[in-house]
Image (cartoon, helix red, strand yellow):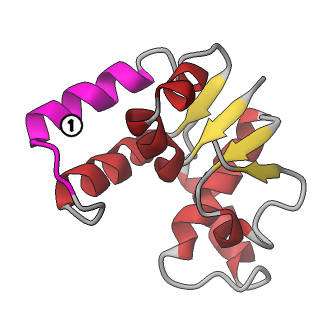
Amino acid sequence: MRRYWDSSALVDALEDSRVEALASEQEQFTRSHTLAEVFSTITGGRLGYKYHPEDAAALIGELTASMNFVELDPKEVQAALDVAHKRRVRGGQVHDLLHATAAKKAGVEVLLTDNITDFTNLADDLKIAPP
């Protein structure tokens, strides 16, 4: 199954071997910015623990080694920002909008996230599910 992984789903994969196995299947997608989001999350301590930056970088590299990366060019980002007002996107939700835009570009069947409600009105034609 073709899946797009947001940062919360990849953090789950670092903590749950079942989710990690899904992440290593073929046809898994994310964007390079997601790596920075995961690094920030697991080294920042908001989860009640912190990885050492060197360990975090290594774990993220191993987890995403077989993933496909879909990137948005400046025109695609601008197009997403141009419709943001229609979708009532504000503040940090722009990152969710760009994840949804990248997932659509990748032609995935599902976008995986722990933050399902964050994607309300952002991905009408995508299935949003927890990993």
Left or right, 61 with respect to 9, comes to left
Most distant residue in the right direction:
125
Residue at 71% x, 45% y: name it.
Answer: 111
Instruction: Please state the extent of the stretch shown in magenta in the rendering.
Output: 49-64
* Mark 1 surroundings within 10 Å by alpha-carbon count, few (fewer than 14), some (14 through 19), many (20 or more): some
- Image location of residue 16, percent across then percent down: 46, 34
- At x 90%, y 54%, the residue is 125
Residue at horizontal 72%, vertical 34%? 106
Q: How many marks?
A: 1
| Residue 130 in magenta stretch | no
- Can you say whether 120 is above or below 109 in the image? below
Q: Quadrant of residue 47?
A: bottom left
Residue 116 horizontal/vertical position (percent): 68, 63
Q: Which residue is mark 1?
A: 56
Say whether residue 69 is visible: no
Is residue 77 in sight in this rendering? yes
Q: Residue 41: image x %, image y %?
A: 30, 56
Circle 1: element type: helix
Q: The N terminus lies in which quarter of the figure? A: top right
